[in-house]
Amino acid sequence: MRVWRTFEEVPAALERTVVTIGNFDGMHLGHQHVVRRAREVAEEVGVATVVAVTFDPHPIAVLRPEHAPPTLTTIDQRLRLLGDAGVDAVLVIPFSREIAAWTPQEFIDRILVDALHAKAVVVGANFRFGNRAAGDRQTLREAGAERGFLLEAVQLDGGPQVWSSTYVRTCLAAGDVAGAAEALGRPFATRGVVTEGDKRGRELGYPTANVPVVAGSAAPADGVYAGWLRRLDGIDAGVNHPAAISVGTNPTFDGQRDRRVEAYVLDRTDLDLYGVEVEVEFVDRIRGMVRFDGIDDLLVAIADDVDRTREILGI
């Protein structure tokens, strides 16, 4: 898959394309539906290349940073998921206030017509663009009639709740990782480099891989979850290790300052993961975060968490 991170990187000799546009944060089932339809439209109009246009950073993070939603995926994860969904190329628009000021016609002319030579454009039915979100699907349809491209607006799907990035964030904020997975079409996962923690888990017989929750990124609500851990460094890369996962600030020990994800790989005390990039995948919630009165009560709870993890993962 080709990736263009500026307009200048798009080849001038690019042939006609089918373009789909969106933030695509999380690449949930609604996004996948739009990309799938773009692929079908490409076959119908005889075009070989489907291009996804996305934005980095998120437009709200530029225009109203205090209201910016936590991101479900990094830009690199988004690119990988777009490729998996079937696009041939991605244009990552480095979003800025200057671009935000473009009129809908500027957006159409500079991106869809001049850069990407669109023969068809496929977007979600609620897509808005241009200065003050003045452009919509009707704007695109009228412009396409003049500039030689077709417009298809895909109705939003899901049910009874329409799939959306906002819906996935709402599920995660409530600890409903199973609901988030239903909307995403896969379990929610977070990535990061394992850092040294307080090593209390090791002292208790349950060593954990600690991954900080990056500011501005989404994570499940504080609590304990069943899931999987995967190394991403080439050693056992892609192997799923069953894990009991804690998210939060360790209230029993008066808490650390920052939230983090702590994953205990079941029955493994020999893993050396410090400095290793891992992916932690959440399957289901076991319980909320609790402050225990003593170590004995905590150990009983951890043992129960491990048993529940085995039940949920079917191992």
Image (spheres, rainbow, N blue to C red):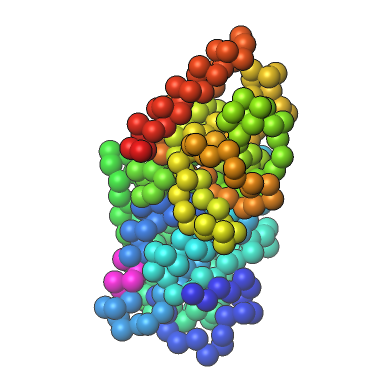
- Residue at image coords 60%, 36%: 208
Residue 202: which quarter of the image? top right
- Residue at image coords 34%, 43%: 182
Along the line of sight, the residue nearer the viewer: 288 or 82:
288
- Residue at image coords 57%, 30%: 206
Decide if residue 174 is on the left or right side of residue 263: left
- Residue at image coords 39%, 64%: 85
Along the line of sight, the residue nearer the viewer: 102 or 124:
124
Residue 285 pos. (x, y %): 43, 30
User: Does residue 38 belong to the magenta stretch?
Assistant: yes
Is 54 situated above or below 227? below
Is 152 situated above or below 156? below
Decide if residue 85 is on the left or right side of residue 99: left
How many numbered marks does the figure carry?
Answer: 0
Residue 313: which quarter of the image? top left
Q: Which residues are magenta?
A: 37-41
Q: Residue furthest top?
A: 293
Residue 232 pos. (x, y %): 56, 57
